[in-house]
Amino acid sequence: MSIFTVASRYAKSLLDLAQEQGQLDAVKADIESVISVLKSNAELLAVLKNPIISGDKKRNILAALFDGKVNPIILSFFYLLVNKGRAAILLDIAQEFIRTYNEAKGIVKASVTSATALSESNLAELKQIIAEEIKATVVLKNIVDPSLIGGFVVRVGDRQIDASIAGRLNKLEKHFAVQGV
């Protein structure tokens, strides 16, 4: 079974449990902080993925890091993952939980890459336009990439709109290359 399939099943189980307990939003917020900790600590990920390290040690490490800081549902869930030999994919499961949560709540992540940072009013306006277009709640992130020269690139799911100067220059270059100029 693929890691994605396993992660998806565990994430769905955690989502269902959190909903059942009436703790969905609290669990989601805690999972986001767990993801942040896991992504910023390569040693922790290495320990969780190492099959030589005992389950007891992994549980103790997770308890030291998260006991009293996250919802008890999450800590119990982590212990279950360790017991089932799934600690290696804890980050994958946490990320899949957030994706599943967003899908269940009708939240879509989008990004706008621009040559300079966009103002809050521009971001709000773009967010509203995207939300109206896709009929969903949008979480918009601004990424700055000076190589775009000007304009922007918007990504929503698997769709992309490139309105950057660099993108237009690349199209123009390809056009001239095809023409043999």
Image: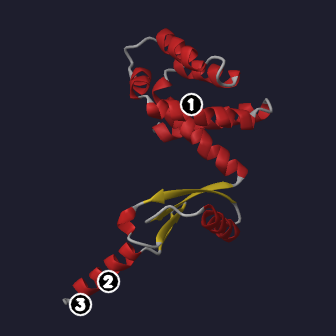
Res 171 → quadrant: bottom left
Q: Disc 2 vs disc 3: which is toward the camera?
A: 2
Give the residue type at disc 3: Gln
Residue 107 occupies quadrant: bottom right
Q: x, y (%) of residue 177?
A: 23, 83
Q: Which mark is residue 64?
A: none
- Where is mark 3, residue-wise? 179
At label 2, the amino acid type is Leu
User: What residue is disc 2 on?
Assistant: 172
Residue that badge 1 annotates: 34
The correct choice, above or below, for 42 with respect to 124 in the image is above
Q: Nearer the viewer, residue 2 or 167?
A: 167
In the visual, does 143 lie left or right of 124?
A: left
Position of 80 relative to 13 (above/below):
above
Of all residues, the one furthest to the left in this rendering is 180
Q: Secondary structure at mark 3?
A: helix
Pointers 2 and 3 in contact (C-beta within 8 Å): no
Which label lies toward us, 3 or 1?
1
Residue 66's spot in the image, x, y percent?
Answer: 59, 20
What crowding class fits label 3: few (fewer than 14 Cα within 10 Å), some (14-19), or many (20 or more)? few
